Amino acid sequence: MKKEKAFLIDITECVGCGACYTACKEANNLPETSDDPLRDTLSDKTFTVIEQRGDYYVRQMCKHCFEPTCVSACPVGAFTKIEFGAVLYDESKCLGCRYCMQACPFQIPRYEWGSLNPRVQKCIMCYNRLLEGNIPACAEACPTGATTFGDRDEIIALAKQKIFDNPEKYYNYIYGLNEVGGTSVLYLSPIPFEELGFNTHLLQTALPNFTYEALSKIPTLVSVGGVLLTGFYWLTNRKNEIAREKFLEKTKSQTERSTDNE
Amino acid sequence: MNDFITRTLRPTFWKVVAVIIIALGIYTIYLRFTGGLAAVTNLSDHFPWGLWIGFDVLCGVGMAAGGFTLCAIVYIFNIKKYKPIIRPTILTAFLGYLLVIFALLVDLGRPWAIWHAIIMWNPHSVMFEVAWCVMLYTTVLFLEFSPVIIERFKSKKLLSFIKGITIPLVVIGILLSTLHQSSLGALYLIVPTKMHPLWYSTNLPWFFYLSAIAVGCAMIIFESYLSAKAFKKNLEFHLVSDIGRWIVVILSTYFTWRFVDLALNNKLTLLFFNSIETYLFWLEIIIGIVIPIAFLSQSRIRLNRVGLFVSACFVIGGFLLNRLNVSVTSLQASSGVSYLPSVYEIIITLFIVTIGVILFNLAVQYLPVYEKTKEGIPIEFEIITDENLKVESVK
Ligand code: SF4
Ligand code: SF4
């Protein structure tokens, strides 16, 4: 596994120019969906958007979570987290249950609703570019340094350094460091994150734990339950057998008596 | 024969309605498979699961719970007096599962890949568990129902084979149902922050399980009443009436657990919020739990055919509301969109219900589901094989 990568999105630096938006479209061969990157929304044809929130711009994309909820949710393992920490989707496995979409805490995966062979679509961290030794197209295109990309530990160090150097410029929090167990897209903001529309109620632990806890009880349930049910059957049936034996004895003695009478 | 044809073809109100629904349903399926999900549903990226998952799948599986509940009562706890109603109950469960699979085939984006779950495993996924439960339990239900079909075609060998494996089948069926009912609740464990706190709970699997048993019992009452009317099959009323007592016990447990759960998680204040969620929550609790408990705990109502039937209807109504609340209401706020099913989604749901009713009717007419022996003792779904053999040999 190649080193875990991460993005740092510094909202104080973003000017909303849309260079990342355009670069993403090109890198992923996505059709044009809007002439104004600030008006577009994430869709099966748009993997990143810039949303204007007051005076600031917030970039949206898949967070490539540390312990991705989508990966744990997919029944057939169509989602995987692989080298560089990229979360990828394999359409040849997918059966289209859309549990990944339901499960993602950031509401990221998009579906080709109009297609007869629909796929789930989202940012793939420009995996092919990473393999070639490049950085993702959006990070390369960003003219201001609002989006930077690198090894996750270095990116975290950089974010901390930025806050340390300029405490009056930044709100003292790195969004994504611990959200749902940590993500690979970290945000720095000048103001509290909830004021920018971030979901600040996310848990600080990985969500797959919740379902795993329930699933891990299955072996016990099946084995203990199986023994218990069979045991009950044996007990209750034993009672019946005794009753029947008694009944048979009684009828036998009755028949004997009736034959005696004759 | 001619007589038969004229009888089937004679239009009645319900037949006309059924034909219309089926025609619309087929048309909708055609649209679905020529234009994709977008052509017929109001689903969106923010609301990926709608009526089909909430009603057709969650409610469908729940209402089939009568099958395993009754099997447990009759075969495991050996309360034999319920044997006469076991066949129709298993039939309902079996048809229920077939229709759930049908609904899935319409709802899945790539239904032809449904078998992938057999070879591509992700044991960390609840959906994976659900997929296996559906496959395995449908097979078990088929085998449990098969004696009825085999009897019709009079194959003694097969019959004795199936009867021989019935106890293992019943045990496996109960285990699978337990897993399946609870796993449908477990599906939602992964959305702790998306789901409204009135419904989210780490005990969701248990809540789904308990409410499924309650509705399973209610379905037995519901069907017995309708079959008694429609097929003039007089099931012994006191049997059915006693099930009402079981419902009271199960619902009381369920009710207590849900409120204790809310209290322990400091959510009681949410009960008095002025929001649509709160109202729907109370509606669900009152219709599905409070009213049925109040009704069924009085023997006057429980021993009254109509009273019992109406109580069962309340249980079923509350159950449906609960599943729709979990799958739709509770996720509405966090999704940022307001989802209402499209006309086509509703048509498919009606279509499925209609097909279910028709198949049930056909099965009852052509298979010995309710048939009685010469002595007037109902043929049971007999599995206590050696018992029967012994009794026969004594004769
Ligand atoms: S943001 Fe959503 S889609 Fe992206 S990795 Fe995390 S859970 Fe998966
Ligand atoms: S829609 Fe596809 S990728 Fe998403 S969970 Fe279902 S099978 Fe997996």
Image (cartoon, rainbow, N blue to C red):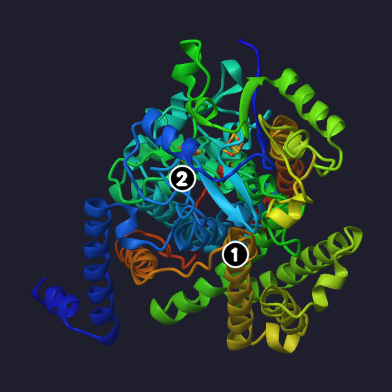
- Residue A97 screen position, x and y as percent: 46, 44
Q: Are marks 1 and 2 in contact (CB under 8 Å)?
A: no
The correct choice, above or below, for B171 with respect to B349 in the image is above
Mark 2 lies on residue: A110
Q: Residues within 10 Å of mark 2 (few under 14, many from 20)?
A: many
Q: Amino acid at mark 1?
A: Gln
The correct choice, above or below, for B185 with respect to B237 in the image is above
Q: Nearer the viewer, residue B162 or B97?
A: B97
- Residue B311 screen position, x and y as percent: 64, 81
- Residue A181 screen position, x and y as percent: 75, 33
Number of marks in the rendered image: 2
> Residue B282 is drawn in which quadrant?
bottom right
The correct choice, above or below, for A151 with respect to B215 in the image is above
Q: Report the mark closest to the observer, 1 or 2.
A: 2
**Secondary structure beneath label 1:** helix
Q: Residues within 10 Å of mark 1 (few under 14, many from 20)?
A: many
Q: Distance from label 1 to label 2 (Cα)?
A: 18 Å
One can see residue A78 in this view: yes
**Residue ID at (47%, 26%):** A137
The correct choice, above or below, for A104 with respect to B265 in the image is above
- Residue A184 screen position, x and y as percent: 66, 29
Q: Nearer the viewer, residue B250 or B298?
A: B250
One can see residue A253 in this view: no
Mark 1 lies on residue: B332
Q: Say which quadrant the N terminus of chain B sits in.
A: bottom left
Q: Chain of mark 1?
A: B
Q: Chain of mark 2?
A: A
**Secondary structure beneath label 2:** strand
Q: Amino acid at mark 2?
A: Arg
**Residue ID at (75%, 54%):** A194
Q: Is residue B25 left or right of residue B127?
A: left
